[in-house]
Amino acid sequence: MTLVTGFSGRFWYWGSRFLAAAILVPLIVIFGAWLVPATEVWGHLAATVLPTLVGNTLLLIFGVAIGTLILGVSLAWLVSTCEFPGRRWFDWALMLPFALPTYVMAFVFLGLLDFQGPVQGFLRQAFGLPASWSIEARHSVGVLAVMVLVLYPYVYLLARVAFLKQGRVALEAARTLGMTAWESFFRVALPMARPAIIGGVSLAVMEALADFGAVAVFNYDTFTTAIYKAWFGFFDLNAASQLASLLLTFVFVLLYLERYGRGRARFDDSGSAPNLRTYRLHGPRAVAASAYCGLILLLAFIIPMVQLLLWAWNWIGDLDFAYLSLLGHTLALGAMAAAATTAGGLILAYALRRDTSWLTRTSVRIGTLGYAIPGSVLAVAVMWSLGWIDRQVAEIWLWLTGTEATWFFVGSVFSLILAYFARFLALAFNPIDSALERVRPSVREAAQSLGFTGVALIWRIYIPILRPGLLTAALLVLVDVMKEMPATLLLRPFGWDTLAVRIYGLSSEGLWERAALPSVALVVAGLIPVFLLAVRGRR
Amino acid sequence: MALLEVERISCTYGDSSALHDFSFEVVQGEIAALLGPSGGGKTTALRAILGFEPILKGEIRIAGEVMSRPGFNVPPERRPVGMVFQDRALFPHLTVEQNIAIGIRREPKADQDRVVRNLLEIVGLEHCISRFPHELSGGQQERVALARALAPQPRLLLLDEPFASLDIDLRERLSFEVRNILKETGSTAVVVTHYQDEAFAMGDQVGIIEDGTILQWDTPFNIYHRPVSRQVASLVGRGVFIEGVLREAGTFDTEIGRIRDEHHDYPHPPGTRMDILLRPDDVLIDPEGKISATVIEKAFKGDDTLYTLRLPSGTRLLALASSHRDLEVGEEAQLGFDLEHLVAFSRSSGI
């Protein structure tokens, strides 16, 4: 008994530290690029594009933060505290834009709004404008609009849960203290939801910073596009790393804001009374609320979906064996990453309960940091680290056999899976952690008293209890890997094109209509986690 | 004139608890307690007084001014009513000071400070002024909630199961403390509770509520010793009914012998079959007693013991006895009776 406990105890102990190191080392390595003497490419970049990059990135951060804040909070407030026609339906439908990857939304909007698109054509015809009349669709406002429409659900979801959890009582207490509806919103509901809202906004901004496809389609230069150009345009991994480390600095500032924005106050101990809708809207106000929710849903989901389906139908002929192989690669990568992250998530979540030392908790925190790190940064980090290992392997190989070795890790499926693992470990960790939270320690004690120990305990007791959590974790990772673009683009082994890579190829050449078909497949896959969220929200 | 007048209101809330033809009054400076099982309508009554539930019939007035009547409802934020919520509902993002001051946020800062300091002194929490709610114990949170509700100087204060989440000792201590604070500040208050001890400790008047109606509105003493109906008697305190026949003015023949009630005349004709309430403190374990019974259950409570006894006829009685003398289950005991306040209801009338 002692022996078994001792062994499994040590396994979790070292497992969690190993995983943390696997995430942390590549990140440290990235900053190591500054130790290498600056290359010519870097000098060129720093002199010409760096100011634009920083300016564009700051605009993106503030634009997305303000946009998602306003949309997300206002929609969440309406559906969680007011009653108006269609509210129950909007409650879940407003999560749907989650299913659209930013880059899909980006090319659909460009397709609709560019010179040849239906909107400008209609405007020319309707107002009798000359055929040469046009407006530039590739504008920073366009990028921001696309990002906000796709990313507001982060804020919406978290704010909605926060408003629901505050319950009716907090608002009623506010009213008995003489506050009007607006006063209670600004003085009570909003400040109480602040951590959730800050969390949602920082997630949205992190997604925006990590995005590669949408900014690429809009020719809006950010760090992710610059990393791509440094790597594929100049083959200068060092300059790419330096850019990546700058991007990472922005991300860490955001992470800091998210974690420390809450101060001493704690926000989660409020009433549990069921939230009956406090404010019943009537007449014009009810119509306005329905219209507002409807408009956002129309812009963020219905119009792009209809356009995608129309285009996909026109190019249905593209659907052949080549597509099946794309789909096969996509699913295979997704499945491998899902298996790896689910196992990793289980190790972290279990370690947290077996050993509550500072080092374990820190390891888990580091292990789950990857969600914040852009795929392109991770790609560069993985490339650096594995490249170094490969060189050591090659030297040993040369010493052993006297022959030159080929690249061992670099350019392998393993390198891509490693990047996915780092990025999506947190995604797998969270559902497993909350599933494990519901297994009381006495369950383990009861099982042990009935003779289940070691592997039998995990296999016969924990895995069956945790199955829903494990499945959710695997599914979420599968879907996100399918949609992942920058890391896949940078690290994919030769011949391993995925749906996302194909979408990038087609949309970067302006072949939007043909990019619709693979996009539909991704959106359908993306609807799965939205469905899961909606079902959970119902309960 | 009564400060709060609830006049024959009807009201529904949710699907279960509704009020029918519900009336009571509370005089300025008095504390009323609404006592009854959960789901009986106590909380619905509070919500109607607060203005969160519209009423279908009747009228609610505060200081003579109409607050609710069918089709008319002064919104909660404009009523001179303060509320201490069941789960306290302190704002978690505000400190103790800010929580208390939020109801008087439009007054000059100096006045706010004075009120907050004064209230914190009254509730004995001066040292907690800059803490957050989660840094306080349950009892301290309760006191802050009370101070917050008192700060705007409401004409009427409502307390909804204020101590429900606290442990028994603290509940007892706080109910006295809060009563003293309310008396000290001259507040008029309505307390809702399903703990009899709490209602009796806090209320000047107690209303017994079941199924959306008031069964009795009276002082704690009278509620206990003069319940108006069998229903009230069984809701309040412990006790059992034994059967008896009324002989002449206030004299009953029962299986424990002839008993007399010198305080009451009963209007019923001699020969009426009645149910007579015996409280546990009416029944004494007395070696000289003439009635013998078997102990079938005992609950040792430290300073006293509650015995359940069976008479030869099968009737059960409860007896509260000092714990010095210890009887075992199955043992025979001799019983005496101390019948100061008799409560009897005629069997046929049902009340």
Image: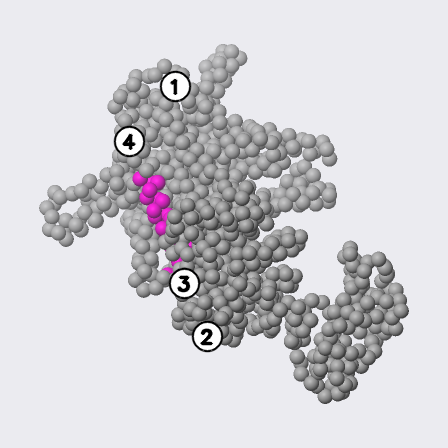
Looking at the image, is mark 2 or mark 1 nearer the viewer?
A: 2
Q: Are marks 2 and 1 in contact (CB under 8 Å)?
A: no
**Tag 4 and tag 1 share a subunit:** yes
Residue at label 1? A34
Residue at label 3? B75
Side (left or right) of A295 relative to B293: left
Residue at label 2? B57
In depth, the one of B287 and A475 nearer the eye is: B287
Tell me the subunit letter for badge 2: B
Side (left or right) of A337 relative to B320: left
Tell me the subunit letter for badge 3: B
Which kind of residue does numbered mark 4 sit on? Gly
In depth, the one of A477 and B58 nearer the eye is: B58
Residue at label 4? A55
The CA span between labels 2 and 3 is 17 Å
> Which x, y percent locates residue A366?
50, 31
**Residue A519 shows in the view:** no
Q: Residues within 10 Å of mark 2 (few under 14, many from 20)?
A: some
**Residue ID at (77%, 73%):** B339
Q: For residue A221, which quarter of the picture?
A: top left
> Which x, y percent locates residue B178?
58, 55
The CA span between labels 4 and 3 is 50 Å
User: In the image, is residue A492 above or below residue A200?
Assistant: above
Looking at the image, is mark 1 or mark 3 nearer the viewer?
A: 3
Element under label 1? helix
**Tag 1 and tag 3 share a subunit:** no
The CA span between labels 2 and 4 is 65 Å
**Residue ID at (78%, 64%):** B320
